Image (spheres, rainbow, N blue to C red):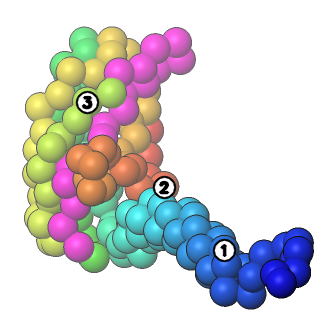
Amino acid sequence: MISNKKGLSTVVTTLIIILLVLVAIGIIWVVIRGVIDTGSGQIDTGVACPLIDVKVINVSSICDSGSCDVTVYRSSGGEDFSGLKIVFSNATDSNSVDYPNNVAQLQTVTIPSQGVEGTTKIVIAPYFKDSQGNNQLCSSVATYNI
């Protein structure tokens, strides 16, 4: 006679455990891959940005009317970047201008820009494009007070 056994056989139990382990590994891998992919773009700018030394060396005298020529010099460093973000500001207003070109090492570039009337301060920051095409600004900026 067949005895009435309650419970799962060892083969079925082993298969269920293996299936649960594979599902857990898949979930963990998705999370880790997302962190690695997201963090890789930040690591690249974190390494490249401190090596870039860009500064404003001259601003045209007509900057008071809002239109200026900003002369930028790159003295050293690192990789080519995607462009410069230039922010003009006065006590009450600011305007941001994008210069979507690299400034080569030891190169001087004059950038015609539309600032704000009565500009007192100019801040420039290089940026890189990430894998999605978004601008990643460097935290190191150059400030020029007029």
Report the residue at 40% width, 41% height from top. Answer: 123
Which is nearer the eye, 24 or 128? 24
Q: Secondary structure at mark 3?
A: strand
Report the residue at 31% width, 37% height from top. Answer: 86
Q: Which residue is mark 2?
A: 139
**Residue 129 visible in rendering:** yes
Magenta span has 86? Answer: yes
Q: Give the Cα distance between marks 2 and 1.
A: 50 Å
Magenta span has 2? Answer: no
Report the residue at 12% width, 66% height from top. Answer: 104
Report the residue at 23% width, 35% height from top. Answer: 98
Q: Secondary structure at mark 2?
A: loop
Q: Which residue is mark 1?
A: 16
Q: Which mark is residue 4?
A: none
Picture mark count: 3
Q: Secondary structure at mark 1?
A: helix
| Residue type marked 2 | Ser
- Which residues make up the magenta segment? 79-95
Residue 43, percent across and down?
45, 70
N-terminal of the two: label 1 or label 3?
Answer: 1
| Residue type marked 1 | Ile
N-terminal of the two: label 2 or label 1?
Answer: 1
Which of label 1 and label 3 is nearer to you? 1
Q: Are marks 1 and 3 in contact (CB under 8 Å)?
A: no
